[in-house]
Image (tube, rainbow, N blue to C red):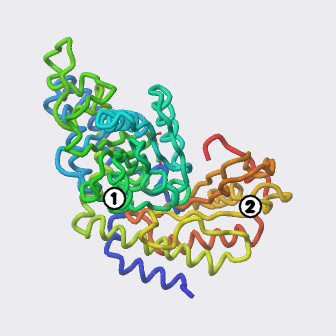
């Protein structure tokens, strides 16, 4: 049995422990939701204040040059590139994940279908994050193409000769399951299709090697594991073999080869710069830079490889402690035990019918009770039926309700994991989660 003292000893030996000092964590909180909104780096408030007060307030429009505002998307892209196995000048930080997906999926479809017009399908995973499916659905509708949604084990079979693009999220947001990017990219290429990889739950969470995998297009999120702040700019990567082949559809002036010549016609910039659209959110980009700076500081301590080792140790510990200490409460494990298939989060399921008055799963209420104790994770509803506590209609359920816990090795320690599980044990053993206030549904879960 692992004890609290064992966990303390692991923290004392942890070479990455100093990284926690880069963040402002509120006292009394164990934050296991860095996969949804990352925490605040200590440097961010002063940096944003400097951008606002000095760069904007004093230097005004001169700051596009004097404060290097103009190339901030490219500079941040270069800072991010090593985390995802991208090369120099292959990434820009810009726009949202949803908007960037629209750009790269359009470009991928153009390229795949120019080479082979019979290809009219986009294949993705049924449990992909909704915005990815919605963007793909919209594009397919606009172009008369077909979106095919499959389960993970059906992907290879779905890669038929009429597939243009395989669009996947590397680490699943509901289960924390991670795809084998290299193998699936190779399978897609063997079938003549291109790949689009969403790294929303991968960038800064697990080592990624886009170039090593031979991937074609990729996008990802700035406000999750990269700690860029709410609504932070996202990023986009395009393999150099494709970057110059097509305009992306949002052909705004920031993607122009010479925006300040103000020509009436569009001439796309070479390379990844054409994936910019309009004027960039400099204050938000500056905040994102503070998040990326922590990863740059982590380089000296072993970088993503060391972060990955710790992340797996934290998630292994959490799984083991939940199984040892919270047995008999209907919890299951949705996240793969196999390290090669696990991201940086652990998702627990709960059986239907275990909620208050036998309705729903109670997962939502358990998460609320934990949040009230300062252990912040989140809840994701099962699919196929109204699934909140007390509202289940008993219809068919493709997926169970999920209690989701993200483990960010930059600032979570082993004793945090111990304490989180101890709170979960108490919430379950005492039935505290059954209180009415924990069974009220809020807009954002
Ligand atoms: C979080 C997330 C997004 C978010 O998209 P936004 O445009 O930032 O709202 C997209 N895709 C996946 C897979 C995500 O996990």
Residue bearing the label numbered 1: 22
Farthest right residue? 357
Vertically, is 261 above or below 166? above
Picture coordinates of residue 372 (x, y %)?
A: 65, 57
Q: Is residue 359 left or right of residue 420?
A: right
Vertically, is 117 above or below 289? above
User: Spatial distance from mark 2 to mark 1, Cα to Cα?
Assistant: 34 Å
Q: Of 349 and 266, which appears nearest the observer?
A: 266
Residue at 20% x, 11% y is 264
Quadrant where the N terminus sits is: bottom right
- Corner quadrant of residue 269: top left
- Are the residues tagged 2 and 1 within 8 Å (C-beta)? no
Residue at 30% x, 36% y is 111
Disc 2 residue: CB within 8 Å of ligand 1: no
**Please, what secondary structure does the residue beneath circle 2 have?**
helix
Residue bearing the label numbered 2: 433
Residue at 13% x, 17% y is 261
Q: Of 261 and 421, which appears nearest the observer?
A: 261
Farthest bottom residue? 1
**Please, what secondary structure does the residue beneath circle 1 have?**
helix
Q: Of 171 and 289, which appears nearest the observer?
A: 171
Picture coordinates of residue 315 (x, y %)?
A: 49, 71
Residue at 62% x, 60% y is 403
Picture coordinates of residue 431 (x, y %)?
A: 77, 66
Task: Please tell me the numbered disc located at residue 137.
Answer: none
Q: Is residue 15 left or right of residue 4?
A: left
Mark found first going from the N terminus, 2 or 1: 1
């Amino acid at each position: 049995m692992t004890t609290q003292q064992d966990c303390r000893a692991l923290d004392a030996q942890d070479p990455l422990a100093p990284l926690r000092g880069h963040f402002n964590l509120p006292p009394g909180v164990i934050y296991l939701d860095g996969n949804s909104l990352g925490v605040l780096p200590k440097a961010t408030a002063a940096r944003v204040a400097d951008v606002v007060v000095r760069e904007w307030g004093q230097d005004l429009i001169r700051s596009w040059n004097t404060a290097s505002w103009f190339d901030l998307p490219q500079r941040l892209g270069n800072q991010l590139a090593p985390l995802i196995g991208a090369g120099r000048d292959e990434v820009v930080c810009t726009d949202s994940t949803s908007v960037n997906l629209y750009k790269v999926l359009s470009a991928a479809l153009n390229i795949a279908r120019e080479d082979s017009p019979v290809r009219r399908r986009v294949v993705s995973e049924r449990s992909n994050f909704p915005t990815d499916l919605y963007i793909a659905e919209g594009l397919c509708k606009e172009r008369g193409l077909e979106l095919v949604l499959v389960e993970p084990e059906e992907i290879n079979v779905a890669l038929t000769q009429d597939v243009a693009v395989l669009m996947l999220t590397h680490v699943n947001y509901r289960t924390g399951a991670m795809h084998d990017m290299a193998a699936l990219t190779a399978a897609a290429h063997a079938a003549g299709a291109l790949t689009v990889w969403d790294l929303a739950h991968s960038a800064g969470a697990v080592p990624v090697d886009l170039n090593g995998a031979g991937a074609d297009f990729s996008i990802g999120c700035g406000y999750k594991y990269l700690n860029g702040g709410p609504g932070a700019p996202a990023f986009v990567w395009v393999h150099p073999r494709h970057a110059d082949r097509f305009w992306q559809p949002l052909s705004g002036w920031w993607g122009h080869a010479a925006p300040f010549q103000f020509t009436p016609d569009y001439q796309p910039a070479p390379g990844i710069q054409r994936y910019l659209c309009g004027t960039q959110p400099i204050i938000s980009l500056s905040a994102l830079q503070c998040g990326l700076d922590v990863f740059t500081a982590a380089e000296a301590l072993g970088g993503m490889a060391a972060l990955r080792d710790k992340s797996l140790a934290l998630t292994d510990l959490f799984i083991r402690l939940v199984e040892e200490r919270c047995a008999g409460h209907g919890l299951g494990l949705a996240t793969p035990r196999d390290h090669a298939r696990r991201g940086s989060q652990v998702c627990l399921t709960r059986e239907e019918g275990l909620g208050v008055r036998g309705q729903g799963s109670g997962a939502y209420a358990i998460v609320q009770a934990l949040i009230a104790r300062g252990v912040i994770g989140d809840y994701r509803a099962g699919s196929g039926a109204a699934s909140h506590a007390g509202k289940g209609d008993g219809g068919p359920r493709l997926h169970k309700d999920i209690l989701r816990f993200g483990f960010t090795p930059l600032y979570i320690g082993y004793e945090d994991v111990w304490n989180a599980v101890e709170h979960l044990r108490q919430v379950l053993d005492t039935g505290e989660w059954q209180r009415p206030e924990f069974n009220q549904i809020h807009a954002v879960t």
